[in-house]
Amino acid sequence: MAQIIRGKELAALCKQQVAERVKALEERGVKPCLAVVLVGENPASKVYVAGKEKDCAECGILSRVLRMPETTTQEELLDTVKALNEDESVHGILVQLPLPENLSAQSVIETIAPEKDVDGFTPINTGLVSLGDARAFYPCTPSGCMKMLYSVCPDLAGKRAVVLGRSNIVGKPMASLLLAADCTVTMCHSKTKDLAQICRNADILVAAIGKAKFVTKEFVGKDAIVIDVGMNRDENGKLCGDVDFDSVEPAVYAITPVPGGVGLMTRAVLMENTVKAAENACKTLA
Ligand code: NAP
């Protein structure tokens, strides 16, 4: 039986630490504030934004949700982000993705001030992450995955890590963080040959491909730690990961569940990044 790395307990601990940092800031007269921009009516996005509001309330962070209609133009959206950049009472800015089809996410991301980029998606933060620079805001999902890994394996040095998926928001920064932790990292993607064989040799396997239950027991070794980033629906419409949990769990050392795994940690790290942004702003003022 594998050790189950539960997001609930780890996220609660992370948010408790954030709440303490928020209190310390409040004693200095600063109230951390996260602004979330939600464009359109995407039902999943609405659920995610509601989750962020709840997390903020739990941590003592102010949340300001700016709801914009589906018909919002690129210029209106950029102006909104620019106004938030200028607003000193706002410490973190997040534009909920995906945006309606007529809007470019990349130019919106590039408009967010790097010091308020709590999602860690701007080119400046991407660069800092790949430099292993602690000033970076680590993107929430990979950072949450690292915390989950450390919870079962405090010393990652020398571990063979395989990252399945090379997206800019998960796979690539995940590889950078693993490398910074002295892992030996292999990145795989849709063109990778002998995928199962490469994965089987991994001490750490991070699956972030968006394919329901793709990773089966043929992909894992018995001492592997498996981190499942995927958020998919199975054939019955039930939420599931990229890993076929039922077949993989008995075959590995530790594994994250879906739901109840990486998603909760992603949310907790957003809170951590927001309090870090507020602390940085405080230092700048001092
Ligand atoms: P993405 O941008 O669609 O990227 C998917 C990556 O997987 C690509 O690099 C793609 O390769 C690779 N891939 C696709 N099919 C593959 C296959 N059969 N074999 C090997 N590699 C394959 O996805 P993403 O945004 O990184 O998200 C991945 C998953 O994580 C999704 O299920 C998403 O919902 C979930 N997610 C969860 C959280 C959370 O908080 N839990 C956060 C973010 C994302 P190519 O580059 O060659 O196309």
Image (cartoon, rainbow, N blue to C red):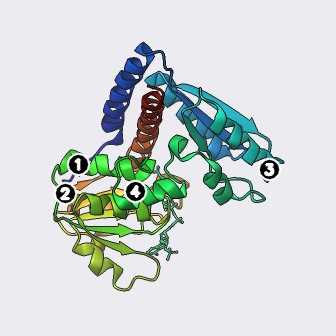
Judge whether 61 appears above or below 36 on screen. above
Instruction: Report the amino acid beneath label 1.
Output: Tyr
Where does residue 221 sit, x and y in percent of width and height?
A: 20, 69
Q: Quadrant of the C terminus?
A: top left
Q: Give the residue pinned by disc 2.
A: 156
Q: Residues within 10 Å of mark 4 (few under 14, many from 20)?
A: many
Q: Give the residue pinned by disc 3.
A: 75
Where does residue 104 sit, x and y in percent of width and height?
A: 71, 59
Q: Give residue 46's quadrant in the image.
A: top right
**What residue is drawn where x is 35% and y is 67%?**
163
Q: Give the residue pinned by disc 1.
A: 150
Q: Could you say whether the residue bearing mark 3 is in a helix, strand or loop?
A: helix
Q: Could you say whether the residue bearing mark 4 is in a helix, strand or loop?
A: helix
Judge whether 280 appears above or below 118 on screen. above
**What residue is drawn where x is 60% and y is 29%?**
88
Q: Which circle's residue, 4 or 1, is located before the other in the chain?
A: 4
Q: Residues within 10 Å of mark 3 (few under 14, many from 20)?
A: few
Q: Nearer the viewer, mark 2 or mark 3?
A: 3
Q: CA distance from mark 3 to mark 4?
A: 29 Å
Q: Which mark is residue 129?
A: 4
Q: Going by the image, does 24 lie left or right of 153?
A: right
Instruction: Report the amino acid beneath label 4.
Output: Val
Q: Going by the image, does 153 lie left or right of 39?
A: left
Pointers 2 and 1 in contact (C-beta within 8 Å): yes
Q: Going by the image, does 184 lie left or right of 18?
A: left
Q: Give residue 236's quadrant in the image.
A: bottom right
**What residue is drawn where x is 51% and y is 42%?**
115
Where does residue 255 sit, x and y in percent of width and height?
A: 28, 54
Q: Nearer the viewer, residue 43 or 71?
A: 71
Number of numbered tags placed on the structure image: 4
Q: CA distance from mark 1 to mark 3?
A: 42 Å
Instruction: Report the amino acid beneath label 2.
Output: Leu
